[in-house]
Image (cartoon, helix red, strand yellow):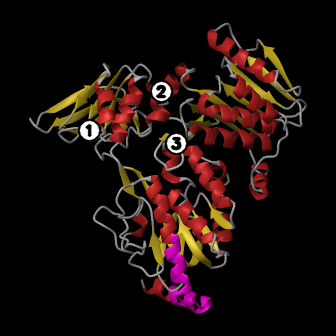
Amino acid sequence: MLDANLKTQLKTYLEKVTQPIEIVASLDGGAKSQELKALLEEITLLSERITLVERNDDAERKPSFSINRPGTDIGVRFAGIPMGHEFTSLVLALLQVGGHPIKLDDAVIEQIRNLDGDYQFETYISLTCQNCPEVVQALNVMSIINPRIRQVTIDGALFQDEVEKRQIMAVPTTYLNGEVFGQGRTGVEEILAKLDSNAGSRKAEELSKKDVFDVLIVGGGPAGAAAAIYAARKGIATGVLAERFGGQVLDTMAIENFVSVQETEGPKFATALEQHVKSYEVDIMNVQRADTLIPGKILQVKTASGATLKAKSIVLATGARWREINVPGEKEYRNQGVAYCPHCDGPLFKGKRVAVIGGGNSGVEAAIDLAGLVSHVTLIEFAAELRADAVLQRKLNSLRNVTIITSAQTTEVLGDGKKVNGLNYKDLKSGTINKVELEGVFVQIGLVPNTEWLKGTLALSRHGEIEVDAKGQTSIPGVFAAGDVTTTPFKQIVIAVGEGAKASLSAFDYLIRNTFDDEESVVETEKVAVAA
């Protein structure tokens, strides 16, 4: 299962284990059980602190296994073979159950310990999903800290009967005590906010007490991270307010065009960004959504949780999100056949028929990836021809299970009330409405800027992007913007990073050319807010 290089790396990691670990495997006579047994035996040989026990019990899922600390209630469970993106989750579980320190703030650990109640989580994942490990690792670590929290990670591709029964069509999907708890990428703080009803108000009160920042960056993607680094290097008080650190990069599979990095993956790149920012004195306020921007000499940002943050300058880097096709059925069947991440959700459609909406690079890449999993892909493009790079089009045209339809407008996603079973499209040449029978629809038609909360506050383009000048200055003095949220052309990570650095330097230049009387400025700002 593990090559020599991986064994060497894992053996080095397992040297950090300080407590005994017992791996308890529930297996049957199937090939996957034998495959899992081979993996667990290899792991056991790498550390004298690990023992393997095989039990022919009545476990509901086979193959599965638990990682336990003998004599305690500490343990996590995997149903399946955690390779691919989940191999890191396996390694972390071994280390953390084995006594290696958990890297969470003391306050967060205490909050997890104090959760009142019994929580049984089931998380359905796919091994190709880059968003799943964050949820798995978050719930695993919570179960290690608080034994009243139990977590099992389930490979949806291996336990397809459960996926079909529960009609799961998107990963990660998490159940709590038998009911759907959440879908999509989620971290510890987000889970805690849902379990601890008073967490939001406590956090808002804490944030509102913070001193005035010299620079407050709103957004934690590549542009926001670059802005934070450049501001912190100037030695000024820097804060980052982010709904999720990493932003849209977290949903990107392969990154092959960031200069000096030949190839990486979005989540890995996002982690590197966060680690770089944390190496400086930057106040990161994660899982916080900006709700209102109030202009003034001292600027204010109000959050959805009710907090108010103050700053002498602001860099807006809220990025963009997947654009929707906005047709009947799309919202109704989201995560029930309508998906936006082929890498994450593709394995759930193995052997089924799907459509990809969009003929740009993203759409064609999605169609190519899905063609290796599903029975048939129908690619639908509004324009008269595909817009993807020629090399991608050649690859797409070579696939036998792909149908390309151009000059076509998707008009409706169809379903039976529970899941997708087709879509209608209009032939733009003849005007006729045609139906395609299928089980999944992957939307890949670009991005829309996250600026709804700024409408009526500063100048936006007709596309909703923040208008900026050559220095990243917006229509409000002291407020700068960078990245995919702005009118800067070409939405690329490398461009966002450069624009973030530029906006931050512009903010610093603004600071040194202006004087601030914090108390008077706050009063003036509050008067503006009341007048508005």
2 or 1: tag closer to the N-terminus: 2
User: What number is the disc on residue 348?
Assistant: 2
Q: Is residue 427 left or right of residue 293?
A: left
Secondary structure under the numbered disc 1 in the rendered image: strand
Kindly indicate the quadrant of the structure image that contains residue 330. Answer: top left
User: What number is the disc on residue 412?
Assistant: 1
Which residue type carries mark 3? Gln
The stretch drawn in magenta includes residue 512: yes
Residue at image point 52% right, 90% down: 524
Q: Percent position (x, y) of residue 446?
A: 35, 48
Q: Percent position (x, y) of residue 512?
A: 56, 85
The stretch drawn in magenta includes residue 39: no
Against 458, residue 100 (above or below) is above
Query: Distance of mark 3 from mark 1, alpha carbons?
Result: 40 Å
Q: Percent position (x, y) of residue 419?
A: 39, 31
| Residues under numbered marks 3 and 1 in contact, where contact means CB atoms less than 8 Å apart | no
Secondary structure under the numbered disc 2 in the rendered image: helix
Which residue type carries mark 2? Leu
Against 156, residue 478 (above or below) is below
Which image quadrant: the C terminus?
Answer: bottom left
Q: Which residues are magenta?
A: 504-525
Q: Depth check: 171 or 233 in front?
A: 233
